[in-house]
């Protein structure tokens, strides 16, 4: 009894676990239950029961409700689908003037809006693409095809690669200095020499459209949310869900609304990239000291002046960090949106992976990663750059960089012109190195992969078999063995113990949504893969982080490594694992582990670093040794931050598990991927995405609530 | 006397959701405790006072006493919950947004505790900021700002960024910025509290020099009683949103109105604060010595001379006219007497 009084929390948890296991053992597996494969496809099966909801027939297996809840939400995807189609094809028909046919046509409003958006996006992308690569479309957009036929000279020539390379080096020099300029130049030269120029520029043009648009929308919405509590309240749940929503899932509804192509990819990228921008804008504006705002007001600023002359410049750094985030999301999406037909490196990467041509995939992946790192470093340099005062400088000093750029443009054009004579009859290498004429290392890599397979096949296979048979399969079976009610009790109980009734209700709602959807089994499989990944990632991440923290240099080095790894578009992680482990669950899990270890490591180091120096000194003066300091001082204080790392690890792991569907898994991700090629997949894809987002949000809610309580308890900000 | 520049009538500021209703129900009888039980926090409680042209009113109080809130009500950075505030006869709370902006652009300047400089602008750009907001041409505003830079003694650093300046220098920029539009009313919210003691003293002297030259109407907020004594024409001492006493420094030291005020005055070296005028007898006797002291002298400076006298000493005004007398024992009582009694 005294023990219970001493550790009430511990006993509450124990009690919860006992109830959970009791339920697990008490509820038998129904005889009719087998791991259901076909449920989501709604095939007719004599064992199925059915009900009609909102005019939709929903079929389900009538199990013992304690074992699996009936899929009462089965109508939701169909309903979403029908609503979307109704919106697109029937709702609000309005007459629109059609330029081509010179007559009025009746079209539903949403369809018209979507077509106009499409045209606008396509125009923007083509414009930038043709500045970089040359082409006709932009001029056509202003004139007509007939006009082009009559004026064969009218064509955007495109910039020679030399100019783009030198231009990016100059920009990098202006933002940061010689080091970054050199890196920028080398990256561009590398891309050109290895024949990846065209797809790289296609990807770049995609990003140059998507990133600024996302920035503008994110900033605008962030400002609106900052100014109005109501807007913020309305945006908050969307932002939360979007943070944990797998990027695949957003693709599917976009397919219905905007079709296939670069424009749809840009719009989808915006949907994914705007939320972090909004969050960082709000964060930055909130961090402005109130006195600065008051100073602005007392200087007689009206609202407009206050926002654009005081608030935004003061929050400049946070907002530019937002730009950095936007760019990173754009790169990630540049690959994923290849699924809906975005051109560029992502498309090549996907194609190569589909053909199992690891060498080609590696080349494309390397290129996209290099560009991502370059843009990441550049935008960070921009964010950290302090404004300098130029008042006393001469015209030359002030415009040095622009002058240099003009000079390179002229030299580049001259070089390209000379090139037309040098490489007469063949390709002008000073203008653009074509895709198949660059140096290719694909064969080398492919041979390498073959060699690895030939040499280590036995070991890899043995490892693979062991992992799948002795670890993964049993774990999966255990997860699937959990009765729905027991899981619900466990999750809700944890919510109650951590955050009280409010948390319990939130978590209960999220879990019920998944449990009542037709994909509970799939969600369990997703959860099992993510759990496995998270456990291993955390073990590695916490250990590596703690070890690196012991030395200042190694800690900084490790954080740098994390930065670079985080810059890689998530899809790129699949390349090396496929190279080593082929198409198995092991590949996916290894990618998950590598990807999810990044936040675990980073947050460990950051958490340990945030322990105040004064405490270190106090501990040292109390005579602790290094180990005692770590266990008694640093770990307890860093633990809340490390738990935030765990939160991120879960989100990362879920993302990668879903992306891993590309290799072939049996979880929710697989169904999202299937929905992509299904004409009526929009509703299914979207609902599945929400399911995954909710899995993430359950943990997010629990961990955040705990961390906040703990931080309050420890008195950390 | 002409119309007061700032006039407050029963100003209340209460934070909380149904603050307005609770204030109405209370009929002006605001009790912080009952309000707090109902989820409201009383910031300013029934503040009434006037500040006349060229006068410096120092509002003194510890943190949480509502002094900054009071200042923000008068500058309308927050809206008062109840009461009336007049700026040069204009009802501040009735102004619409546009009129308020006009008022701030032309009549008001404010200095902040944390300096509140714009990090992306240089010294001279920061100072020119209110001018540019007003719509004055860049050239004119910069040249005007340069005058201000000279006024606060920052010449040569006009192209520095705030991050490159020390705290004292940053506050000089803050002061210059608040003066750039040549306001009539000058608000200072604990301007020197974030500075080191030595710099603070230097800035106080500098501030007195400026005020001597500019003769603004000032509301100065501080938590430092010594600073209040040194600078103020009148001091308002606040506690829990209530103005406990509003009087000249001498009167506060000599006649503290409440126990709370008395605690502040206990440790004050009176001979450094009080003037002869404050302690003299207005009546004159014929039995005066040869020594004459000016009524505006600080006691400390003349105490030694007076104490060597046996008879009372004549007190004269600027025109050499005798306006009163002071007995040496009075000096002794003032310097030592009061404090003993209190212990």
Image (tube, rainbow, N blue to C red):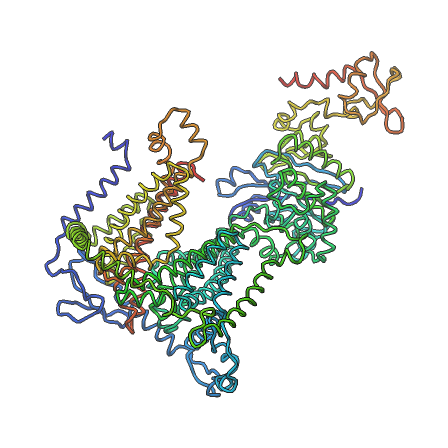
Residues A27 and A191: in front is A191
> Horizontal and vertical percent for residue A350?
31, 66
- For the C terminus of chain A, give its image quadrant: top left
> In the picture shown, does residue A73 fall above or below A83?
above
Relative horizontal placement of residue A475, taking residue A348 as reference (left or right): left
Residue A637 visible within the image: yes
Q: Residue furthest top?
A: B310
> In the picture shown, does residue B53 fall above or below A569?
above
Relative horizontal placement of residue A561, taking residue A384 as reference (left or right): left
Residues A626 and A705: in front is A626
Residue A477 visible within the image: no
The residue shown at (41%, 47%) is: A560
> Horizontal and vertical percent for residue B214?
77, 42
Q: Quadrant of residue A434?
A: bottom left
The residue shown at (34%, 75%) is: A85
> Horizontal and vertical percent for residue A296?
62, 51
Relative horizontal placement of residue A256, taking residue B279 as reference (left or right): left
> Horizontal and vertical percent for residue B311?
84, 13
Q: Quadrant of residue A365?
A: bottom left
Number of numbered callouts drawn: 0
Relative horizontal placement of residue A130, taking residue A250 as reference (left or right): right
Q: Quadrant of residue A51?
A: bottom left
- For the N terminus of chain A, give its image quadrant: top left
Residues A92 and A648: in front is A648
Residues B87 and A149: in front is A149
């Amino acid at each position: 009894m005294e023990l219970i009084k001493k550790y009430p929390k511990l006993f509450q948890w124990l009690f919860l676990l006992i109830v959970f296991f009791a339920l697990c053992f008490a509820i038998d597996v129904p005889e009719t239950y087998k791991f259901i494969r076909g449920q989501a496809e709604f095939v007719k099966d004599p064992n199925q029961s059915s009900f009609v909801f909102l005019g939709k027939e929903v079929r389900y297996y009538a199990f013992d409700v304690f074992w699996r809840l009936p899929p009462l939400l089965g109508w939701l995807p169909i309903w979403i689908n029908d609503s979307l189609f109704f919106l697109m094809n029937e709702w609000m028909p309005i007459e629109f003037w059609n330029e081509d046919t010179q007559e009025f046509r009746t079209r539903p409003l949403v369809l018209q809006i979507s077509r106009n958006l499409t045209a606008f996006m396509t125009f923007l992308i083509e414009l930038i693409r043709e500045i970089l690569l040359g082409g006709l479309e932009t001029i056509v957009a202003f004139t007509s095809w007939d006009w082009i036929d009559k004026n064969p000279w009218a064509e955007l020539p495109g910039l020679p690669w030399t100019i783009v390379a030198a231009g990016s080096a100059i920009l990098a020099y202006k933002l940061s200095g010689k080091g970054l300029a050199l890196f920028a130049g080398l990256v561009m030269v590398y891309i050109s020499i290895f024949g990846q120029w065209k797809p790289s520029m296609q990807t770049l043009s995609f990003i140059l459209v998507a990133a600024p648009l996302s920035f503008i929308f994110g900033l605008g919405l962030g400002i609106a949310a900052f100014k109005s509590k109501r807007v913020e309240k309305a945006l908050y749940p969307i932002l939360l869900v979007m943070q944990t929503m797998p990027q695949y899932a957003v693709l599917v509804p976009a397919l219905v609304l905007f079709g296939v192509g670069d424009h749809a990819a840009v719009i989808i990228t915006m949907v994914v990239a705007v939320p972090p921008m909004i969050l960082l804008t709000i964060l930055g504006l909130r961090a402005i000291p109130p006195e600065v705002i008051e100073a602005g007001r007392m200087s007689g600023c009206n609202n407009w002046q206050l926002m654009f002359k005081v608030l935004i410049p003061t929050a400049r750094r946070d907002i530019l960090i937002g730009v950095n985030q936007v760019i990173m999301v754009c790169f990630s999406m540049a690959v994923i949106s290849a699924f809906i037909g975005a051109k560029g490196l992502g498309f090549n990467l996907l194609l190569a992976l589909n053909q199992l041509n690891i060498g080609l995939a590696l080349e494309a992946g390397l290129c996209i990663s290099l560009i991502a790192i370059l843009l990441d470093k550049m935008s960070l340099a921009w964010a950290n750059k302090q404004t300098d005062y130029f008042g006393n400088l001469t015209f030359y000093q002030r415009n040095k960089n622009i002058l240099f750029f003009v000079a390179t443009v002229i030299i580049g054009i001259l070089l390209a012109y000379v090139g037309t004579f040098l490489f007469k009859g063949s390709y002008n290498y000073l203008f653009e190195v074509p895709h198949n004429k660059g140096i290719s290392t694909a064969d080398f890599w492919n041979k390498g992969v073959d060699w690895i397979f030939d040499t280590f096949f036995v070991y890899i296979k043995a490892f693979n078999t062991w992992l799948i048979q002795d670890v993964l399969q049993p774990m999966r079976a255990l997860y699937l063995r959990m009765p729905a009610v027991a899981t619900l009790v466990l999750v809700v109980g944890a919510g109650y113990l951590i955050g009280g009734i409010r948390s319990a209700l939130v978590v209960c709602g999220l879990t019920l949504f998944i449990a009542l959807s037709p994909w509970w089994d799939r969600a369990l499989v997703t959860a099992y893969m993510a759990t496995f990944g998270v456990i291993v990632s955390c073990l590695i991440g916490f250990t590596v982080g703690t070890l690196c923290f012991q030395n200042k240099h190694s800690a900084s080095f490790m954080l740098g490594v994390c930065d670079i790894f985080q810059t890689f578009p998530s899809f790129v992680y699949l390349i090396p694992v496929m190279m080593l482990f082929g198409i198995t669950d092991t590949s996916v899990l290894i990618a998950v582990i590598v990807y999810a270890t990044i936040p675990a490591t980073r947050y460990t180091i950051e958490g340990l670093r945030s322990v105040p120096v004064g405490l270190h000194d106090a501990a040292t003066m109390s005579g602790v040794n290094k180990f005692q300091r770590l266990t008694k001082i640093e770990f307890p204080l860093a633990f809340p931050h490390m738990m935030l790392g765990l939160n991120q690890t879960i989100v990362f792991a879920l993302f990668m598990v879903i992306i891993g569907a590309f290799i072939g898994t049996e979880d929710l991700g697989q169904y999202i991927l299937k929905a992509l090629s299904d004409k009526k997949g929009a509703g299914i894809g979207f609902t599945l995405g929400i399911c995954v987002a909710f899995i993430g949000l359950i943990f997010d809610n629990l961990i955040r609530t705990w961390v906040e309580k703990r931080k309050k308890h420890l008195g950390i900000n | 006397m002409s119309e007061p520049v700032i006039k407050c009538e029963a100003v209340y500021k209460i934070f909380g959701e149904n603050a307005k209703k609770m204030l109405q129900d209370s009929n002006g009888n605001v009790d912080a405790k009952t309000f707090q039980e109902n989820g409201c926090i009383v910031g300013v409680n029934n503040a009434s006072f006037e500040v006349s042209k060229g006068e410096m009113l120092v509002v003194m109080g510890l943190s949480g006493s509502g002094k900054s809130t009071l200042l923000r009500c008068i500058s309308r950075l927050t809206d008062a919950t109840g009461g009336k505030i007049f700026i040069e006869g204009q009802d501040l709370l009735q102004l619409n947004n546009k009129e308020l902006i006009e008022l701030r652009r032309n009549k008001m300047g404010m200095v902040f505790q944390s300096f509140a400089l714009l990090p992306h602008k240089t010294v001279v750009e920061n100072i020119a900021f209110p001018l540019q907001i007003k719509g004055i041409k860049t050239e004119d505003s910069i040249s005007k700002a340069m005058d201000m830079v000279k006024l606060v003694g920052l010449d040569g650093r006009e192209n520095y960024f705030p991050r490159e300046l020390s705290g004292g220098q940053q506050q000089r920029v803050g002061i210059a910025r608040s003066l750039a539009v040549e306001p009539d009313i000058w608000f200072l919210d604990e301007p020197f509290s974030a500075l080191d003691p030595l710099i603070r003293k230097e800035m106080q002297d500098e501030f007195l020099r400026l005020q001597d030259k500019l003769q603004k109407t000032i509301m100065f907020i501080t938590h430092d009683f010594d600073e209040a004594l040194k600078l103020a024409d009148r001091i308002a001492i606040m506690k829990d949103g209530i103005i406990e006493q509003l009087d000249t420094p001498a009167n506060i030291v000599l006649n503290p109105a409440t126990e709370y005020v008395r605690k502040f005055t206990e440790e004050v070296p009176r001979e450094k604060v009080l003037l002869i005028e404050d302690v003299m007898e207005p009546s004159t006797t014929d039995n005066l010595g040869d020594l004459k002291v000016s009524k505006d002298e600080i006691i400390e400076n003349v105490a030694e001379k007076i104490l060597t006298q046996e008879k009372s000493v004549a007190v004269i005004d600027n025109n050499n006219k005798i306006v009163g007398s002071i007995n040496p024992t009075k000096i002794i009582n003032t310097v030592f007497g009061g404090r003993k009694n209190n212990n």
